[in-house]
Amino acid sequence: MRMPTTITATKDARPLAERVAHVADIAARYAGEVDAAARFPAEAVDAMRTTGLLGASLPTALGGEGLTLGELGSIAAKLGAACSSTGMVFAMHHSQVLSLSRHLGGSASLAILAGRIASEQLLLASATTELGIGGDVRSSSCFVDLEGDRVRLIKNAPVISYGSEADLVLVTARRNADSAPSDQVLVVCDAANLTLEATGGWDTLGLRGTASMGYKLNALVSADRVIPEAYEAISAETMLPVCHVLWASVWLGMARALVETSRQYVRSAARRSIGSVPPGATKLVDLIAELERFEALVDGLTARTESLFDDRDALGGIGYQVSINNLKVTASELVAQVAVAALAITGISGYRNDGQYSVARIFRDAQGAALMVHNDRIIANTARLILVQKG
């Protein structure tokens, strides 16, 4: 059993941009070590705490900064450029913060808990997948079991990213033992009231710092930790769009870092061959064009999501759901394509794990983008939506 964070962050009065730059600097400093050891980016997350970034998406009424989705995406991109794993932790955390804060359902106890995220800078994780359901996050076999004024929840989750580091874990489950697999609720489990038994390690190709191990989760929490709104609404109106926008922003940041390394490599080659165009220069032109297409895609869907963020019906509409699904699929493919192109430009210098022009770490991280909720599953879900879409 992990005890919750006890350090209350002091208010950092610096402008947001300075605080983000500070966290990004720390993330970049430890990125290689985090990757090599496949360990949680503790230094960067501690910096998020001391700069107040973990509570920044909460509305000001709950003690947060009320950052917009676009502002969160900009931060995610900067952190992703510095350390992919740090960027993903930031993105996954805030998808859970907003899933809680936007769906309080009038619960006073949940509102108090949300306020603690800001005052104590609590880190949130999620457990939405489960063994035996084929990766379908909109289906659960585990269920909420009422025990007096508390609820028991037992779940065998193949993935809980940074679960052992989190102060709160948001867990999907059937509403009760008699509920259909799709009749789900979201339960907020305090670290002090749950046990996580690891069922495997995390020695992967990339995104090694996310520590996305499997766990058997056993929680006994107060009954008021069950979010009143159905998970179906939480997923469609908050968790899915926020996840996809912030994930895509992290991947965009990774792509920018790859392009910048490629640019520096070509400039260095040009200085060595004055009077001629280095072979990688023409490839760099194409790579920059690809990055611009990537930026337009992410900026467009971020702006569209922001414009609809208070329109729950529109967020749950088929047209938007198709678009946000396509954002995840396309962005995950683009970051992998940019990584391949950057490696082609930098050659053996990029292939090396060390050196100024290495793209090896981000190249490996980029391969995981399509696997985080597998693109094939998302495409299949999108196809089903299109079949029933009118017009």
Image (cartoon, helix red, strand yellow):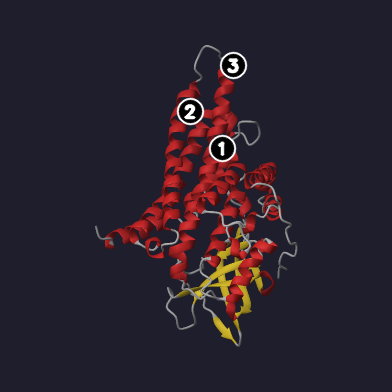
Number of labelled discs? 3
- Residue for point 44% across, 75% down: 181
Percent position (x, y) of residue 327? Answer: 42, 50
Label 2 is placed on what type of residue?
Leu
Between marks 3 and 2, how big is the CA–CA gap? 17 Å
- The answer to which of marks 3 and 2 sits earlier in the sequence is 3
Q: Relative to the observer, which residue lies in front, 161 or 8?
A: 8
Amino acid residing under circle 3: Arg
> Identity of the amino acid at label 1?
Ala
Disc 2 to disc 1, C-alpha distance: 13 Å
Instruction: Decide: few, some or many residues near mark 3? Use Cα within 10 Å; few <14, some 14-19, many ≥20.
Output: few
Query: Depth-wise, is mark 3 or mark 1 nearer the camera?
Result: 1
Q: Which residue is mark 1?
A: 257
**Looking at the image, residue 124 lies above or below residue 209:** below
* Left or right relative to 45: residue 107: left
Secondary structure beneath disc 2? helix
Identity of the residue drawn at 71% across and 54% down: 50
Q: Is residue 216 above or below residue 301?
A: below
Residue, disc 2: 284
| Residue 388 seen in the figure | yes
The residue singled out by tag 3 in the image is 272
Above or below, 227 against 76 in this view is below
In percent of width and height, residue 182 lies at 42, 73
